[in-house]
Image: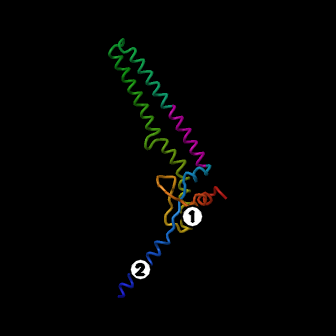
Amino acid sequence: MKKIILSLGLLMLMSLGVSAQKFAFIDSEYILENIPEYQAAQKQLDQMSIQWQKEIEAQFSEIEKLYKDYQAESMLLPDDVRKTREEAIVAKEKQAKDLQKQRFGRDGDLFKKRQELIKPIQDKMYEAIKEVSEKGSYAIVFDKSGGVTMVYTDVKFDLSDEILNKMGYRK
C-alpha cells in the first residue's frame, strides 16, 4: 500500500513539473535585421562575393575566348603548338576552378570571412537568448525564422524584442 501511495505521489509531482514548463519563440531574422553590425557585415560579405564572382567570371570569359581562338586556328597549327595551346587552356581552366573553390568552397574565403564577421554577433545573440530564457524560466525557445514550422504563435511568447533589449539594440 505504501508503494502505491508513494508511486502516485511521485507521479503527481512529475506531472506538476511537466505542466510548469514554459515555451517561447524568437525570430532570429528579425533580430539580426535590427543589429547594425550584422547589416554592415552582411553588406561587406555581399560586396566581397560580387567582386570575387566578377573576378572568376573574367577568368572564365578569357578561357572561353582562348578556346574559340584555338578552335578557329587549330587546323592550321602544327601538332606541338596545338598541344601546347590545349594544355594552356586546360591549365587556365583548372586555375579558375581552383580560385572558385578557394573563394566560394566549403571552407573557402567567403565562409571564413562570414565566420569572422557574423559568428561574434551570433554568439552575442545566443548569450542574450540564454540569459532571457533562464530569467523567464523557459524550457524551450524556438526560432520561427528557421525550418521550424509553427502553426500558431501567440505574440506574448515572442522574445525577439527582449533579446534585442538584452543585446543593447533597443531601449
Asked whether, in this view, residue 9 is left or right of residue 171, the answer is left
Q: Which of the 4 image quadrants contains residue 94?
A: top left
Amino acid under disc 1: Val
Question: Which residue range is magenta in the image?
Answer: 37-54
Q: Which of 49 and 98 is in front in this view?
A: 49
Number of numbered tags placed on the structure image: 2
Amino acid under disc 2: Leu
Q: In which quarter of the image is the C terminus?
A: bottom right
Identify the residue at horizontal 36%, vertical 84% (top origin).
Answer: 4
Measured Cα–Cα span from mark 2 to mark 1: 30 Å
Asked if the residue at tag 1 contacts the one at tag 2, i.e. Cβ–Cβ closer than 8 Å, the answer is no
Task: Give the residue furthest to the bottom.
Answer: 1
Q: What element carries label 1?
A: helix
Q: Which of 130 and 116 is in front in this view?
A: 130
Identify the residue at horizontal 48%, vertical 41% (top origin).
Answer: 109
Q: Which of the 4 image quadrants contains residue 155?
A: bottom right
Position in image of residue 84 (x %, y %): 36, 20
- Taking the magenta stretch, the answer to whether it contains residue 116 is no
Q: Which of 86 and 21 is in front in this view?
A: 21
Q: Main secondary structure of the magenta part?
A: helix
- Taking the magenta stretch, the answer to whether it contains residue 42 is yes
Crowd tier of the residue under label 1, counting other residues whose Cα lies within 10 Å: few below 14, some 14–19, many 20 or above: some
Position in image of residue 138 (x %, y %): 52, 66
Report the residue marked by disc 2: 10
Tell us which disc is closer to us: 2 or 1. Answer: 2
Identify the residue at horizontal 36%, vertical 11% (top origin).
Answer: 76
Position in image of residue 104 (x %, y %): 46, 39
Task: Give the residue furthest to the top.
Answer: 76
Report the residue marked by disc 1: 132
Q: Which of marks 2 and 1 is nearer the N terminus?
A: 2
